[in-house]
Amino acid sequence: MPSRTCGLSLAALLALLFLPGCGNNTLNPFCGSARPAPLIGSLSPSTISFAEVQQGSVLIVNSSQFVSSSEVVINGQALSTTVASGQQLKVTLTTGVISDPGPVNVAVRTPSGNSGDLGCTSGGSSSTLILTVN
């Protein structure tokens, strides 16, 4: 008779350990500390004046799969980010980040979790949206 562990056959247990779980960690029980890759949906506002940047304007990034370690990245520079919820991040835009009017690349990055090499995906970067600074 095949060896069983908690109702699972040895083959099923090995499959759970070594299969990546279709990329979303759902089948690998050791992916508990893995973090989802962030998604980015919209910016509020999507257009601001350079004068508002000079005054320290707040940008709200909306979407989903944000976690406490998610950070907004402006033109490649990670900013101090307030995580309002799993769907909303807030950052203050200043001339230290945006030095001139023009298009600004905005993305979200979530550092990887403590998943090691167990077939788990963890963290990542969102797609990029453009903030227009007039």
Image (cartoon, rainbow, N blue to C red):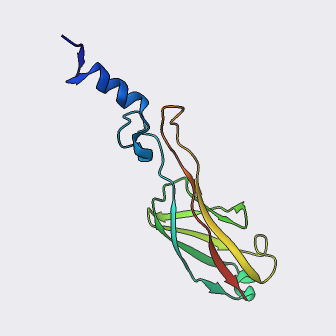
Tell me what residue is drawn at x 64 percent, y 70 percent. 106
Tell me what residue is drawn at x 81 percent, y 76 percent. 99
Asked which quadrant contains residue 20, the reply is top left
Tell me what residue is drawn at x 58 percent, y 83 percent. 45
Asked which quadrant contains residue 3, the reply is top left
> From the viewer's perspective, is residue 77 above or below residue 32?
below
In the drawing, does residue 101 fall left or right of residue 82? right
What is the quadrant of the C terminus in the image? Answer: bottom right
Tell me what residue is drawn at x 56 percent, y 45 percent. 112
Q: What is the number of callouts on the image?
A: 0
Residue reaching furthest to the top:
1
What is the quadrant of the N terminus in the image? Answer: top left
> From the viewer's perspective, is residue 23 above or below residue 93?
above
In the drawing, does residue 85 fall left or right of residue 12? right
Horizontal and vertical percent position of residue 48: 66, 86
Horizontal and vertical percent position of residue 119: 48, 35
Horizontal and vertical percent position of residue 114: 52, 37
The answer to which of 84 and 42 lies nearer the viewer is 42
Residue reaching furthest to the right:
99
> From the viewer's perspective, is residue 126 above or below residue 124?
below
Horizontal and vertical percent position of residue 100: 81, 80
